[in-house]
Image: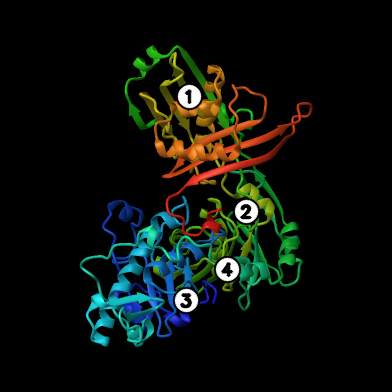
Amino acid sequence: MTPNEIDSREFGESSDPMDRREFLKLIGPGLFIFFSIEDSFLLAQARGYPEDFNAYLKIGEDGRVTCFTGKIEMGQGIVASLAQMLAEELEVPYNSVTMVTGDTRLCPWDGGTNGSRSIKYFGPALRAAGAEAREVLIQLAALQLRLPQDRLVAKDGRVSDKSDPRKSVSYGALTKGNTIEKHLEKKPALKPPSAFTVCGKSLPRPDASEKVTGKAQFAGDIRLPGMLYGRVLRPPAHGAKLKNVDVSGAKEINDVRVVQEGEFVAVLHSLPDQADKAMARIKAQFELPEAVADEKTIHKRLMETAGRDNVIENKGDLSQGRELATVKFDEIYYTPYVAHAPMETHTAVAQVESDSATLWISTQRPFGAQEEVAKVLGLPASKVRVIAPYVGGGFGGKSQIGQAVQAARLSKIVGRPVLVAWTREEEFFYDTFMPAAAVKISSGLNASNQIVFWDYQVLFAGERSSQNIYNVPHLRTASRGGFSGGGPHPFGTGAWRGPGSNTNIFARESHIDVMAAKAGMDPVEFRMRNLADKRMIRVLRAAVDKFGWKPAKAPSGRGYGVACLDYLGTYVAMAAEIKVDKGGGRIQVNRIVHAQDMGPVINPEGAR
């Protein structure tokens, strides 16, 4: 069974708001456990979840376990790792867990699959649900077996007598086709990593077979009766306004539907190539906006844009630090706009009825998409169901759902299901970009080559990973603007592969190399001298030892590079070797060694 084969026919068609008891009736037979996480940080992350929902599970009469999560699978393997985490605490076989992901009708609210948070923040909540369900099952088994709880143990989907394993009962037999709602006043502790039997193993991904055989369903694979393919007229420049349009050529194609609502112009056909042909025949004139920046002037524009600095960290006294410095550095580091370029372009299928809508969207934010589409259609969010099939790469870009809005508008107008899939050209031009950014760093070393002050300002990339990881007594870190939104950018920007971190780590570690070179020190030795975090030192040492790093004063001319970072609590260090063609400037990466300390590893192969 695929992650989205459990549909409304099994769980009911109505999408009206319901209370908790009605929802339990809707879910049907099986054991259903709700739980709460008291940790305020997790609650903040989970704001918007319905009451009593952080994560949840269902145990059927046959013993199979269904795990519901608002997270989506876009290649990162959470359908394996989350299933492992639930199986670990619930004490069921890994292959007995079926994942249902990203369905706004069946799954608890989630803020989106982003920021490397699925395992780190949703995982503990899921484990807590599994642990509580396990203890409830043991209580039920004690009543049925007429044995004290302390004599019972749960394993492989059964509860058995420790002294006499013949006395046992399966999870499915305990539920007896009934819904059991029960809370434990005292929540059970989660297993320590030393007790893991499922987590920590490279178990096969449940989506592997479907994906290598071509059976996996992505949004563009959805086919509905009477479905049309939609193509939307797009302007040749960001911010361009439609002056006039001639659609007569498109109307000459048999069975084409042409839609005009103000500047929203589209064609629809039952065959995608005919829709493309019709779009090519539309003649349009646009009023182009005045260009405010280009690749040569954008960084100057960023630095001249006024804004308020958000101080991320402030320690010591920068003036005192400057007095201690014998060598000072002032540098600016720039990053360009970068596209996401996922294999799957933005795609959506919309089926809009008179008072409801269902959409299959390639999205990282099913619940955010639900809200946005509902506003466009003028429907309550409860009347819009979003299903996220497998997503063919996101990298932050699939947080935007312009294609779904287009499909929904068209479906409402023509009264039929509509599929909108962006072309590769549209994907590169109309998706959001990693923002161009600038980072200003002023720093200084004392006579012992220790960093004594660090004044850091990042402009329009966001603050993530801007925090200093080195041992500096006097420092200030500030951020102006974020990675998402308009501001000084001439087009949309957004999350891209660790938003903010890519810019901030590049700037900081490049600056560390500049300082090491001026000090005449090996870049690894320089970092070690200025690091105090023992965990970071250990990770950096692991990387360079495996690499076989031989110290040499920078610049060494040998094509070695090193960097380290703390990404939201995960410690990473990398060492790389490159070869440079000094005549033509071509760079060839020979090898990279990567060391990472992320805490307990759920699926080692997935981590690799």
Q: How many marks?
A: 4
Find disc 4 in the rendering and name its residue.
207
Q: Residues within 10 Å of mark 3 (few under 14, many from 20)?
A: some
Give the quadrant of residue 141.
Answer: bottom left
Residue 430 image offset from top left, x and y in percent: 61, 49
Q: Earlier in the sequence, mark 4 or mark 2?
A: 4
Residue 22 image offset from top left, x and y in percent: 31, 78
Instruction: Please say if 389 is above or below 607.
Output: below
Find disc 2 in the rendering and name its residue.
342
Residue 265 makes an appearance in the image: yes
| Element under disc 1 | strand
Give the quadrant of residue 533.
Answer: top left
Please state which amino acid type lies under the numbered disc 3. Answer: Ser
Residue nearest the observer in this picture, 587 or 471 = 471
Q: Nearer the viewer, mark 3 or mark 2?
A: 3
Q: Residues within 10 Å of mark 2 (few under 14, many from 20)?
A: some
Residue contact at pointers 4 and 1, CB within 8 angstroms: no
**Separation of marks 1 and 3 at Cα, in angstroms:** 53 Å
Please state which amino acid type lies under the numbered disc 1. Answer: Ile
Find disc 1 in the rendering and name its residue.
441
Find disc 3 in the rendering and name its residue.
96
**Separation of marks 4 and 1 at Cα, in angstroms:** 45 Å
